[in-house]
Amino acid sequence: MNRYPDIGDHGLIGDLQTAALVSTDGTIDWFCCPRFDSPSVFASLLDHDRGGHFRIGPDRGDYVSRQLYFPDTAILITRFLSPDGVGEVVDFMPVAEGSATDRHRLVRLMRVVRGTMRFRAEIQPRFDYGRKPHKLELHDDAGSLFRSDDLTLTLHRADLPGRSLHEEGTSLERDGDGLRLTKTMREGEIAGVVMDSAGDPPKAVNPQELVELFNDTVRFWRGWLSRSTYNGRWQEQVARSAMTLKLMTYAPTGGLVAAPTAALPEQVGGERNWDYRYTWIRDASFSVYALLGLGYTDEAAAFGGWLRDRIRE
């Protein structure tokens, strides 16, 4: 694992109320919950040793990886190519439209495209920027709970029902106050995990449920893109930029954050360690102007309403 990967070596996923960064080695190294400006759960992007991370990747070092988005969506695919096979981790967050909610889900779907692959998952949350301790509770084969004073994260495991961990080819063990999971998978097999912030007890999930969440998320993003009025030659680039702006919008108010991250200077240890998880009026105005030019009048109206309310305050 690269201790501090470049910001360009990441993909962005989100649910319109918060967002996460996924590096090209399959590590979620930035995630705040339940909002953009909430304290971090995973922040190894800022502090590799104490920030917390959630990695899923091959259980070996001789691989190469590539990242791409599932076409016309904010669903990220990290593809791993090893001597034994080709595997993928598909990351997304089911969209949380409407009012603010404390339930946010990180879905991490593993699948093997060719050959075999042994995946390793390392789950090491660090609540409140690494300042608050937490307790780990294991619940049989269903998953686990990570409990802190202010937030509880549930990890639901998704695999074929009716099989033991040994029959699944899965190993699950504590790693301090985190978890380490390894799983050997063959061509055509799928499995995964869901990390949920609602605090519900963990449960075994059929992988087909993750596929349904995947399909729902695809429908949302393709439906949203279909509202664009742009028909120029840069269709793919414009669509990707528009989705990125949408991912940076806090749906309950219409406000746009300047960036989903905090304290990322131009150079490691450099200046400009600002928190960008707030609405900077100038930056947001340019963003809304761009969306309005693509025909997204609802987003422009929501931002205007939010700004009007702030002025009245």
Image (spheres, rainbow, N blue to C red):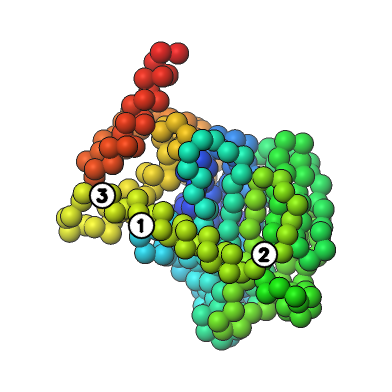
Percent coordinates x, y for residue 241 in the rendering: 33, 50
Q: Nearer the viewer, residue 96 or 93?
A: 96
| Circles 3 and 1: CB atoms closer than 8 Å | no
Q: Nearer the viewer, mark 2 or mark 3?
A: 2
Percent coordinates x, y for residue 155 in the rendering: 70, 56
| Residue visible at 35% across and 50% down in the picture | 224
On residue 228, the disc is: 3
Picture quarter with the N terminus: bottom right
What residue does disc 1 label? 222
Which residue type carries mark 1? Answer: Arg
Picture quarter with the C terminus: top left
Q: Is residue 163 above or below residue 10?
A: below
Position of 144 with respect to 55 (left or right) is right
| Residue visible at 47% across and 43% down in the picture | 97
Q: Nearer the viewer, residue 277 or 292?
A: 292
| Residue visible at 31% across and 34% down in the picture | 300
Position of 150 with respect to 74 (left or right) is right
Under circle 1, the secondary element is helix
What residue does disc 2 label? 205
Under circle 2, the secondary element is loop
Which of the two discs, 3 and 1, labels the residue nearer the N terminus? 1
Task: Mark 1: give few (<14), some (14-19) or many (20+) Cα within 10 Å.
Answer: some
Q: Nearer the viewer, residue 289 or 133?
A: 289
